[in-house]
Amino acid sequence: MKVLEPENVRPYCQNQSFLFPPNLRDMIVDDDLCIVVDDVVNSLDLSCIYKKVSSEGNLPYHPKMMLKVLFYAYASGIFSSRKIAKAVRENVTFIYLAAWQQPNFRTINNFRKNNLKELGDLFVQIVHICQKLKMIKLGHISIDSSRFQANAADRRTYDRKRIDREMKRLLDQAEKEDQEEDALFGSDKTGDELPKEIRKRKHRIEKLKKIRKQLDEEGKEKLNSTDPDAVFMKTTAGIKTAYNAQTAVDENAQVIVATEVTNKSYDVDDLLPIVDQTEENTDSRINILSTDSGYSSADNLEKLESREIDAYIPDDQYQSKTRRKKVPPFNKDNFIYDESRDVFICPEGQQLKFVCPQRRNHKDTYLIYQCSECIECQYFGQCTSSKKGRTIHRRALDEKIKQMRLKLDSESGKAIYAKRKVIIEPVFGQIKAAMGFTGFMLRGLKKVNSEFKLVAIAHNLRKISKYVYKESIDLSLKIAEG
Ligand code: SF4
C-alpha cells in the first residue's frame, strides 16, 4: 500500500548533491573547543616534531593535524587510539581538524608514542600562551597530587610470598602429574606425550624467577609484571596499581603550570622539584604557595623561606582533634624542653634523655627522648604503660612548625589557606570527572609522565576555551600580538 507523503514539510533528500560543497567550518559553532585547539596548535613552534619527519618512504600525516586531533581527543575525554580513529571518521569537529584525512588507530598510537618527549616542550609553550592571555598571575600557586591507575592489572603484582606460593603450587602440580604419568605409562616414559602443559609450566616458573630476581635487584617489596614502574597506592577506588601525579595550579584561571608523575606514594620529596618546574615553565617567581600537610617537612619550610616564597603548609598534626582540645595532663605540651641540657622535664620533674634519631614517613627526622624513672612513678599507667618508660619525639626543626602554625592561625593565613581547596582540588575533579581521565593508556614511568603532560595540555586548552569565551577575546589575534 502506497503511503502518501505529507506536503507541508521541508524537502528531505539525503543524496542531494551540492552546487558548491559545504564548508565544514560553517557547521561548527564559534565557541567550540576545537576552534581553540586549532588556533593554539597553529601558533605553536613545532620544529621539535618537524625535524623528526623522515624525507623517505610514504608521506606521513602532517604533525600539526595529528596534534590537533590528539589534543582535542584528550580534551573531549577520548583517550584510546581506536576511539580517536573512529571519531576522526564520524565526528564533524574531528573531521574538521583532520581536514577529511583519516589516520588509523595504529598511526595515531604511534604518533603519540613517538612524540612523548616533545609533549613536555609543547606543554610549556601552552603555559606561555596562557601567560600571554593573562590567565596566569603566579599570585597564589597551589600544589597537590592525585593518583591515577596504571595500565596494569592488580593481580599481576607480586611480592616474594606470592612468588614462593605460586612456585610451590606449580612444582607440586608437576610432581603429582609425574606420579600419575609413571603409574599410567611406566617410569621409563620420556614425558613427550604432554610437552605443551609442561612447557607452559616451565615458562611460568621461569617468569616467576625473573620477577623475584628483579625484586631483589631493585630492592622492592612488590612488583607488577605488566608495568614494573607502577606501585600499589591508596586511591579513591581502594588500593590500586597506580602512579602519583604532582600538579601545580595557578589561582587566577586554574591553569596547570607544572606537572610531574612519580611512582612514590608520598609527596614530601616532590615539593621543591615541582616549585622549580613552575618557576622555570613560567620564567617567574612564585609569590604565595599552599599545599596540604603531605608536603610538610622542616627542610621544605626552610628552603621555601630561603627562596622568599610565602608558604602555607600545615604539619600533619595541625588539624588533629587533640590540638584543638584542652591539653591533657600528660600531653607532650606539658613536658618542658631544656635546651642547655638537651632533655625534657616531665610534670613529675624527671628527665627524659635523648636516645636516638628516627626518620618517619619519609619526612623529618625525629629525635627520641626517654625517661628511665617511670616504673616507680605514681602516674605509671596514666602517663605511660611502657616498661621502657615514657618517650617524647622532637622534630629537628620544631620551631619552623610552630611559626607555620601561628601563620596559619592568623586571620590572613586562614583566608589564604582556605583558597587552596578551591584552586587545586577542582582541577583533579575536572580531569577525572569532566574529561574522564582516571588511568593511563601507556606503561612505564617516563611514558606516563609524558601522557600526563598531554592530559595537562588538554585541561589547559579547556581553560583557554572557557576564558576567551568569557572575556570575548579573539584568540588568534591575541596570540599573534608580540
Ligand atoms: S610516668 Fe615517667 S614521664 Fe610520666 S610523669 Fe611519671 S616519671 Fe614523668
Image (cartoon, rainbow, N blue to C red):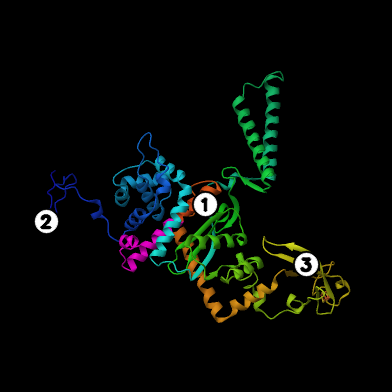
Would you place residue 246 above or below residue 372 in this image?
Answer: above
The residue tagged 3 is 368
Instruction: Give how far apart the Cα atoms at labels 1 and 2 are.
Output: 59 Å
Above or below 16: residue 312: below
Q: Which amino acid does the dot numbered 3 rest on? A: Ile
How much space separates mark 2 and mark 3, taking CA atoms?
A: 90 Å
Q: Earlier in the sequence, mark 1 or mark 2?
A: 2
Q: Position of residue 276 (x, y in %)?
A: 55, 61
| In magenta segment, residue 322 | no
> Does any portion of residue 108 appear in the rendered image?
yes
x then y, percent, for residue 137:
45, 69
Part of the protein shown in magenta: 456-482
Mark nearer the viewer, 1 or 2: 1
Pointers 1 and 2 in contact (CB under 8 A)? Answer: no
Q: Position of residue 417 (x, y in %)?
A: 54, 73
Mark 2 falls on what kind of element? loop
Q: Residues within 10 Å of mark 1 (few under 14, many from 20)?
A: many
The residue wearing badge 1 is 449
Q: Which residue is under mark 2?
A: 8
- How far apart, in angstroms, are the residues tagged by discs 3 and 1? 39 Å
**Rendered residue at 53%/52% (across/down):** 149
Could you classify mark 3 by the number of other residues whose Cα lies within 10 Å: few (under 14), some (14-19), or many (20 or more)?
some
Of 101 and 117, nearer the camera is 117
